[in-house]
Amino acid sequence: MDAAFAEVVVIQPSARPKLASQVRLRVEPGRTTLLYGELGGREHAPSEVSSARGLVLSGTGADIARLCTGDRSVEDIARELSRRYARPAGLLRREVSIFLERLSLRGLVGWRA
């Protein structure tokens, strides 16, 4: 594929993101990791975690991922984060959209209408 035509995901403010079935959040003190890969959607023992791939999330990324239940829209997530961080919802909507676009391109998040 020509780099000029790289894959793009257009995220509508009304779209409701949900973590993909093969994705799990692992929360430890001071660190949240998005686990995906060989584990699939099944439950796993702590010793199996090493066979999964993981994406360590920033604090904001972890908050966004926790809110991706399929019940909240992108707009709802931005408003919630606006309340938590006392930052403009419009700015956060853009950050949420960029973060979710990246997860979507990796197949880590799906969408509900």
Image: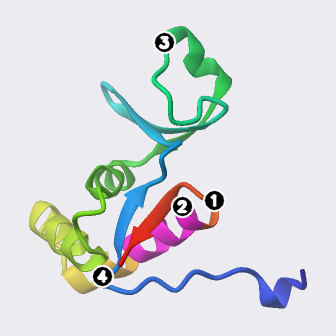
> Label 2 to label 4, Cα distance in Å?
19 Å
Amino acid type indicated by mark 2: Leu
> Label 3 to label 1, Cα distance in Å?
24 Å
Q: Which colour style is shown?
A: rainbow
Which residue is at 42% across, 76% downward? 97
Residue 43 picture location, percent across and down: 45, 23
Tell me if label 1 and label 2 are in contact, CB under 8 Å.
yes
Q: Which residue is mark 1?
A: 106
Residue 78 picture location, percent across and down: 24, 73
Q: Nearer the viewer, mark 4 or mark 1?
A: 1
Q: Which residue is mark 2?
A: 103
Amino acid type indicated by mark 3: Ala
Amino acid type indicated by mark 1: Arg
Q: Which residue is mark 4?
A: 91
> Label 4 to label 1, Cα distance in Å?
24 Å
Q: Earlier in the sequence, mark 2 or mark 4?
A: 4
Q: Nearer the viewer, mark 2 or mark 3?
A: 3
> Tag 4, which secondary structure?
helix
Category of crowding for the residue at label 1, using alpha-carbon neighbours closer than 10 angstroms: few (below 14), some (14–19), many (at least 20): few
> Tag 3, which secondary structure?
loop
Q: Earlier in the sequence, mark 4 or mark 1?
A: 4
Category of crowding for the residue at label 2, using alpha-carbon neighbours closer than 10 angstroms: few (below 14), some (14–19), many (at least 20): some
User: Would residue 13 be found to the left or right of residue 87 on screen?
Assistant: right
Q: Which residues are magenta?
A: 96-104
In which quadrant of the rendered view does residue 49 lie?
Answer: top right
Which residue is at 9% across, 67% downward? 83
> Label 2 to label 3, Cα distance in Å?
25 Å
Residue 22 picture location, percent across and down: 53, 42
Residue 80 picture location, percent across and down: 15, 66
Q: Earlier in the sequence, mark 3 or mark 1?
A: 3
> Label 4 to label 3, Cα distance in Å?
39 Å
